[in-house]
Image (tube, grey):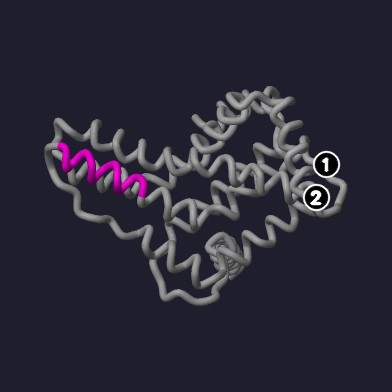
Amino acid sequence: MGYTISLTAAARIISVAICGAGTGYLPGSGDLWVAASAMLALNSPLSLLTGWCIMLAAMMPTLLAAPIVHVRHSSLVRRRTRAVLGFCTGYALVWLAMAAPLGLLALLLDMVWGWAALPLAIAVAFVWTASPVHQRLLNRAHRLPPLRLSGLRADADCLAFGVQHGLLCAAACWAWMLVPLLASEGHFAMMLLIGIALLAERLSLPRRPRWHAPAIVALLRDLKLRELASVAVRNA
């Protein structure tokens, strides 16, 4: 659903990359402020926030299946909707707060590196997701805390769990979420590919923090090996 809305709205929301200077020099604070002012002149704050929310709505729901199931199973039947709303509110507040710093970082990268900002961001995302720190964050995101069943304490638990999970998700996913902000062309396709990469990370099992191939690379490798095995069986 989120991807459908994103595709429909793409023509009306100007991406950060279009607004960047793309001149390939390191700007001073004044230059960054001018570029940010130009972006706000071309896009109202409401339209930028709407675009960010649409991107979140497209990319995040599949990542929240496990914690939402945990929230539902940890709540009384009559409180399940309320509990899920509390969790989602806490999670959304974190990502709404991430809109400004990630947007400014994308704008700065576009001003400094120009056309090279997008491949640079992709390279950084691959290195980050291969790092031990990233794996440590993913391991923590797999932990599901106990939640109280009723009362205001239960509401507070769900909200706090949403904030905690949002912070872990933002810390783990920031590099990938930066990439679509730099994609002036193929924005929708980039969102779809990164959504798959994030889902592959979230579905991977916890493991010892160390340098390793990113989850999306491991997934593609496994799919290729299965394809080769299938071809070998058919040709046997």
Q: Front-most of 194 and 21?
A: 21
Q: Secondary structure at mark 2?
A: loop
> Which quadrant of the rendered structure holds the C terminus?
bottom right
Q: Nearer the viewer, residue 155 or 230?
A: 155
The residues colored magenta run 152-163
Residue type for callout 2: Pro
Q: Is residue 187 left or right of residue 150?
A: right
User: Where residue 34 appears, x then y in whole percent?
Assistant: 77, 37
- The residue positioned 48% from the left and 42% from the top of the image is 95
**Which residue is drawn at the image coordinates 44% and 56% (left, top)?**
202
Disc 1 to disc 2: CB gap under 8 Å: yes
Task: Decide whether residue 69 is among the magenta residues.
Answer: no
Q: CA distance from mark 1 to mark 2?
A: 10 Å
Residue 138's x, y, as percent?
43, 62
Q: What crowding class fits label 2: few (fewer than 14 Cα within 10 Å), some (14-19), or many (20 or more)? A: some
Q: Which mark is residue 27?
A: 2
Q: Which mark is residue 21?
A: 1
Relative to 218, residue 108 above or below = above
Would residue 125 appear left or right of 56 to someone viewing this image?
right
